[in-house]
Amino acid sequence: MKDITHKPTSERFARAQAMLRIDPAILRATGHGRNTDKGDAIEASRVAGIMAVKRTWEALPFCHPLAITACDVHFEFLDEGIYLEVSATCVGPTGVEMETLYAASVAAMNLYDMLKPHASADTGLISVTDIKLVEKRGGKSDFRDPVSVRAAIVVTSDAVVSGVKEDRAGHIVRDRLLKKEGVDIVDYIVLGNDPAPIAQTLDALLARDLDLIVTVGGTGLEPHARTVEVVEQRIQRPIPGIMEAARQHGQARTPRALLSRGVAGQAGHCLLVTFPGSSAGARQTCDAVLTGLLASVRPAPSSS
């Protein structure tokens, strides 16, 4: 089963359909499925669909258990049979497409089971068809924007500069921005913890009209960790929600997340964000904020 531990939760919605093709004579004879030999086929199938949404993970081995917060099964009578739709909502790390598809098929099969005793050679066969996804919403695909973002990464670590520590956190952030998000990384700079070079580097990058500057490191409680203070001096409009989301996401995975002093905000057009210098912290911050962060970034206005 795919590991989704790292994924942040968001509201998810999906809607799937199925079609029970049946002779109209059967529907007339059973009061549109309300009076079959086995009982009310419509309400029984509604319950079957709702139960299936909540228990998909037990039937499909690679589906994750989800806390379903809303579900509806809708029936419509057509000339060729009964059309049904199942919709579901959850707040979770993965979508509910399979839940609605499975539920639509189960509801349709329950209709089939309760109506088939009323079929005959004269009325013809009953069939279940057209099971498919109709709509899905939620997750990072809703926030993808085709705009090009120009960014720079500034790693601040005495240990990395001296060669004592490998620059893993910076590479994690770079790879996520470049390879997974398609961000144009125009500069990648590694510095020590001295505030003066950090300040000079940030000022030079801000003068280049970049869309995004990410610092990696210097967000902890060590006396030499001063990156946050340097960045704060350049932020004109704080955006506390970015790091609040990162800390909330991280706190569910490690108790140390609350010790991060990371900040974020705008300096003119550019968005400045401070990421932790640990590999786990950098990875979790990427998971928590990149989707929303990049959706809010817009390229610098053209000077022409």
Image: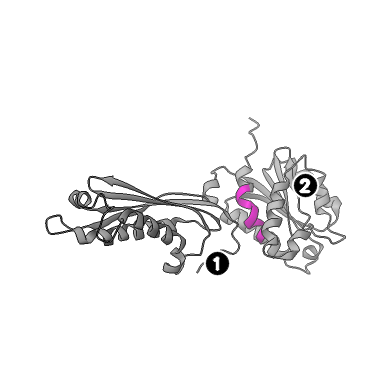
Residue sitting farthest toward the top? 304
Q: Position of residue 251 (x, y in %)?
A: 70, 61
Q: Is residue 285 inside the magenta stretch?
A: yes
Where is residue 294 drawn, in percent x and y? 62, 47
Which mark, by number, is residue 3? 1
| Colour scheme employed for the rendering of this structure | one colour
Question: Tag 2: residue type?
Answer: Leu
Instruction: Look at the image and tell me whether residue 37 can be seen.
Output: yes
**Amino acid marked by disc 1:** Asp
Which residue is at the front of the view, 228 or 32? 32
Direction from residue 291 to residue 196 in the image, left or right: right
Q: Secondary structure at mark 2?
A: helix
- Which element carries disc 1, helix, strand or loop? loop
Disc 1 + disc 2, Cβ < 8 Å? no
Provide residue 183's location: percent of width, then percent of height: 60, 49
Question: Looking at the picture, does residue 77 appear above or below residue 171?
Answer: above
Instruction: Specify the principal SS of the magenta part.
Output: helix
| Magenta segment boundaries in residue numbering | 284-292
Indicate whether residue 52 is drawn in magenta.
Answer: no
What whole-number distance in Å separates the C-alpha atoms at marks 1 and 2?
Answer: 37 Å
Mark 1 vs mark 2, foreground winner is 1
Residue that badge 2 annotates: 202
Viewer-nearest residue: 171 or 21? 21
| Placement of the C terminus among the 4 image quadrants | top right
